[in-house]
Image (cartoon, rainbow, N blue to C red):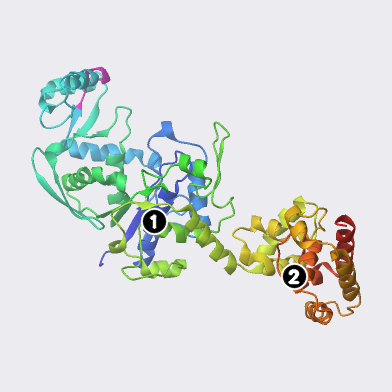
Amino acid sequence: MSQKVRVRFAPSPTGPLHIGGVRTALFNYLFAKKHEGDFVLRIEDTDQTRYVEGAEDYIVEALNWLNIPYDEGPGKEGDAGPYRQSERKGLYREYADKLLASGNAYYAFDTAEELAEKRAEHEAQKETFIYNWHNREELNNSLALSEEETKQKIESGEPYVIRFKALENEELDLQDEIRGEIQVNTKVLDDKVLFKSDGMPTYHLANIVDDHLMKITHVIRGEEWLPSLALHVLLYRAFGWEAPKFAHLPLILKPTGKGKLSKRDGDKMGFPVFPLEWKDPKTGDIASGYREDGYLPQTVLNMLVFLGWNEGEGSEKEIYTLEELTKAFSLAHVSKGGSKFDPEKTKWFQHHYLQEQDNVVLAEQFLPFLKEKNIDPALTYVEEIVKTIKERATFVSDFWELSSFYFEAPTDFDAKASKKAWKEGTAEIMQNVKNVIAEVEDFNQENLQEKVKGWITNEGIGFGKVMQPLRLSLVGEMKGPDLFHIMTSVGKEETLKRIDFAIEKLK
């Protein structure tokens, strides 16, 4: 590619960023980095009625948390700025006027009532009203009016829009980097509004002008923009500009595979559909986010990239670093069909990445959970425990359930486990085990194991008859890692105290 690759992610600040949008950002980022190009963030906020306070900051924070920051955009000004469409609105009228001058656009004065009437007439005949080549010269616009009439209407302040004059009957051969060749006949296109009566451009005009001025080489966006591809290619042609290459990403589908993934699916099935938690500034409603639910950014990226991409036929690799993804990524391996979202697979990725985390980091993240329970242990103690339990955890929030007995003695015993482990004669065995433990001077895991197991062997007692009630005494139920690790961690005094308590409580 001789021209420097430049891609853009262009969300509207109308609320939190859906993970479908995050995937679009990720694929743009990977494509840019693979080709040593630029990843641009442009905020498409021309529709101020839908603007939501805090949404832009949310988008920036999400990209930074995921380690896919933009190279140019708000706060990172480059030569192509400004990067908010609301700050570029002075530009768009000039380009609308160029299209008027070249005959590729026209003024339309039709009122909402007039258009509603036309729609109703068509519906009555079971037809759909389309404003285009077949009726535009009979409607209230500058193609049907004389130059003088048009001028008079504009000068008298009559509201108008500027519409694109779509071609009457041409077979367009369009190219999509994912879907290949697409044929569209222009006779099915309507004359889209490019400039609204409030003096603001529509998405179609603003997006084309901005992409051209920002030297965007590849437009990688969601499948929902596929119906607009023909119009956008025609707009480039009307301006006499070279169009970028287009790639339309497949939908992310519900876990059932039927329909597009929505927030409602997440609420119903208990998983987030946003990267970060979002608090609605108007209603105060809170929507969960991957970050606050304890997921790692690597998890989210690895999960998202597989929703529509794989390295190629025969590849079974599932775990990728961001660097590996950048090297491997190709639009040629993006699928055309939608991808089913799998919440369980996301947890699988999360489990993997949690195991890779440094134990000190995890211990530090676990400390606030302990503080909530008024437990204030040394970080080194927590680190040792984390090392022992993390292989059974998916989130840091799982740690308490897996390790509470390291911090608190049991006050009660699981009924089912007690029935199974504590029989007649068990109290006497536990008293003898307690005496063996009490005699261990160098109280470490190895010594304890040697003394206790040696005693069991010498006494000729079944291991289950000793180890099960011993675990029950220390933990309160039949769970947890190596018993001798638990004893070493809580210390001799605490170990003996717990055995005493169990003997008393379970007699």
Farthest residue, direction left: 169
Q: Quadrant of residue 156?
A: top left
Give amino acid for label 2.
Gly
Q: Nearer the viewer, residue 277 or 299?
A: 299
Q: Secondary structure at mark 1?
A: loop
Left or right of 168 in this view: 417? right
Q: Quadrant of residue 50?
A: top left
* Position of 206 relative to 76 (above/below): above
Q: Residues within 10 Å of mark 2 (few under 14, many from 20)?
A: few
Give amino acid for label 1.
Leu
Farthest residue, direction front: 424
Q: Is residue 289 magenta?
A: no
**Residue denoted by label 2:** 464
Looking at the rendered structure, which numbered label has been put on residue 307? Answer: 1
Specify the segment rendered in magenta: 108-114
Left or right of 30 in this view: 103? left
> Residue 145, can we see it?
no
Residue 420, given in percent of the width and then of the height, sits at: 74, 60
Q: Secondary structure at mark 2?
A: helix
Q: CA distance from mark 1 to mark 2?
A: 48 Å
* Position of 195 relative to 424 (above/below): above
Task: Looking at the image, tell me whether mark 1 or mark 2 is earlier in sequence order.
Answer: 1
